[in-house]
């Protein structure tokens, strides 16, 4: 499973600033300030989990990946 949270920047959670989440180049969704996602993933070595911000504004993400 992967957990990703958009925690904003400098203690400011801006609901208008989002990041798109991609797994293996497929868009999963968008996380705005304060939003989070936790989902199961089954990736191999050649697949990536990527995020791309909508704007040039700074965004800080927390993330963790759990596996067995």
Image (cartoon, rainbow, N blue to C red):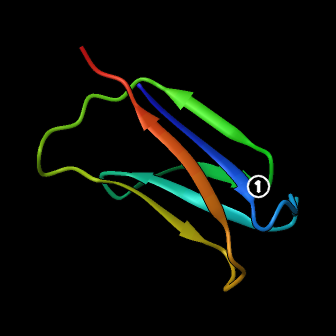
Furthest-top residue in this view: 68
Coordinates of residue 38 in the picture (x, y in percent):
55, 28
Judge whether 45 appears above or below 37 on screen.
below
- Decide if residue 26 is on the left or right side of residue 28: left
Left or right of 64 on screen, residue 47: left
- Check disc 1: other Cα within 10 Å, few if <14, some if 14-19, many if 20+: many
Q: Which residue does the image show at 26% across and 28% down from the upper left?
A: 42
> 3 or 22, which is in the foreground?
3
Judging from the image, what secondary structure is the residue with disc 1 in?
strand
Depth check: 24 or 64 in front? Answer: 64
- Rendered residue at 68%/52% (across/down): 6
Residue 10, relative to residue 63: is it above or below?
A: below
Residue name at image x 88 percent, y 59 percent: 15
* Residue 18: percent from left, percent from top: 72, 63
* Percent coordinates x, y for residue 54 in the rendering: 66, 74
Q: Which quadrant is home to the C terminus?
A: top left
**Residue sitting nearer the eye, 26 or 7:** 7
The N terminus, quarter of image: top left
Residue at 61 percent across and 35 percent down: it is: 37
Q: In this view, does 27 lie above or below 5?
A: below
In the rendered image, which quarter is residue 53 located in? bottom right
Q: How many labels does the image show?
A: 1
Which image quarter: residue 35? top right
Q: Going by the picture, which residue comes out furthest to the front?
A: 10
Q: Residue under label 1, please give it.
A: 32
């Amino acid at each position: 499973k992967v957990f990703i949270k958009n925690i904003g920047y400098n203690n400011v959670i801006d609901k208008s600033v989002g990041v798109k989440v991609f797994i293996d180049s497929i868009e999963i969704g968008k996380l705005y300030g304060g939003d989070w996602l936790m989902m199961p993933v089954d990736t191999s070595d050649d697949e990536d989990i990527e995020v791309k911000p909508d704007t040039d504004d700074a965004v800080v993400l927390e993330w963790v990946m759990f596996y067995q």
